[in-house]
Image: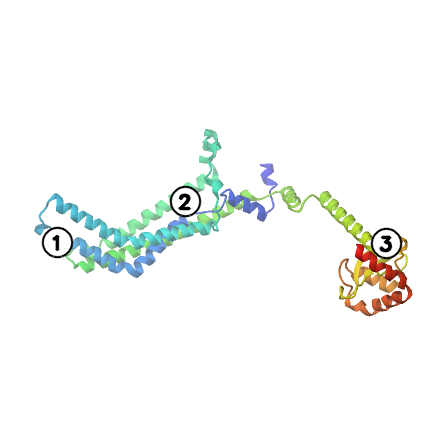
Amino acid sequence: MAEQDNKTENATDKRVAEARLQGQIARAPELQVVAGLLATFATILFAGKTTAIRVAELWTGIFGHLHEIQISSERVGDWSRISVLTIFTLALPVMSTSMFAGILTGLLQTRFALSPKALEVKFEKLDPMAGFQRVFSGQSIVRVLLDAVKLAIVGALLYSAVKQVSNEPIFSSVVEAHQLGSFIYDTTLLLLFRFSLALGGVAAVSYLYQHFRVSKELMMSKQEVKEEMRSAEGDPIIRAMRRQMARRFLQKQMLAAIPTADVIVTNPTHFAVALKYERGVDKAPVVLAKGENAFALRIKEIAAVHGVPTIENKPVARMLFKFGKVGEAIPAQLYQVVAEILGFVYRTHRLYFHELKRRRLVA
């Protein structure tokens, strides 16, 4: 009970998806019954009057001419086959629409989710004690109450309908066949409408209860939510290690590219940015490497070893470090000032750039 009291958080999307795979979904069978009744009502409303008259004429023709029919085993068989085939043909539209509506409503309740695990055999359900607990559980009591309400509604509606139609002239005088068909049609629609209306209310209450029950069962504790988020995002320590490894790999790549740089722009102590520009290859100068503090010092050391020109320009170095991205062209706002820097190093380090062509070919 204490564990249940700690479950104060709504279920996460992952928990809900897993519950659906297990078949743990809010469902009310009464909704499918109501959908079938409404589909039957609609079918009869649009096509049932003609069907009712045909049924009345069929039975009137049979019972009105019994004295003219020679009774034999062959004739009885023929009449039976004709009657069954006619009734089946007339009832087929109602049966089809009702079945389709029931299946569609069931799929809508589950949001078209397939739950193969719900069909698996669970041997724990064979436990007598567990079965005893299920029989006397709160859910079973609610189900019994709903069934009792449904039974009371059906009984009351049948009693009301019988009392209402018992005064119809059809039960006290001779009527035409079409009047018999109209009586069947009107009475059927009346009963279907009343049943649909009454059971619709029961179905709504049942579905709301099932939704509340499933939501309550799927609730999670704060610790469970944290663990699920941690599982989805990964362990923080592992994520930090991955970021550190990625950073080291990137730094290694940047340091390896420094010998092919055109110039190193520094501020001069905190930042260092290596730039490269090849005519016919690059549309604009590209950031090969950038770093601050200790890594900036490392960039300048490697540049000094390979003779890469180093230019001190504090504002440009800060802007390149802040807005430049490794492997991409510099921001357009810095084109002019960087072009001036490159023009200066091209004029003052001709021997380096002659050697740089060979380095880039080897790289």
| Residue 43 in sight | yes
| Residue 312 in sight | no
Q: Secondary structure at mark 1?
A: helix
- Residue under label 2: 146
Residue 187 horizontal/vertical position (percent): 27, 55
- Residue under label 3: 299
- Whether residue 288 sits left or right of residue 111 in the image: it is right
Please rate how many residues cluster around mark 2, counting C-alpha atoms within 10 Å: few if below 14, some from 14 to 19, many from 20. some
- Whether residue 277 sits left or right of residue 8 in the image: it is right
Please rate how many residues cluster around mark 3, counting C-alpha atoms within 10 Å: few if below 14, some from 14 to 19, many from 20. many
Q: Quadrant of the C terminus?
A: bottom right
Front tag of 3 and 1: 3
Which mark, by number, is residue 64?
1
At 41% from the left and 44% from the top, the residue drawn is 146
Please rate how many residues cluster around mark 1, counting C-alpha atoms within 10 Å: few if below 14, some from 14 to 19, many from 20. few
| Residue 316 figure quarter | bottom right
169 or 15, which lies in front? 15
The residue positioned farthest toward the top in the image shown: 128
At 80% from the left and 68% from the top, the residue drawn is 335
Q: Quadrant of the N terminus?
A: top right
Residue 151 horizontal/vertical position (percent): 35, 45
Which numbered disc, 3 or 2, marks the residue that appears first in the sequence? 2
| Residue 49 figure quarter | bottom left
The type of residue carrying mark 1 is Gly
Which numbered disc, 3 or 1, marks the residue that appears first in the sequence? 1
Q: Secondary structure at mark 3?
A: helix
Which numbered disc, 1 or 2, marks the residue that appears first in the sequence? 1
The type of residue carrying mark 2 is Leu
Q: CA distance from mark 1 to mark 2?
A: 46 Å
Which mark, by number, is residue 108?
none
At 44% from the left and 42% from the top, the residue drawn is 142
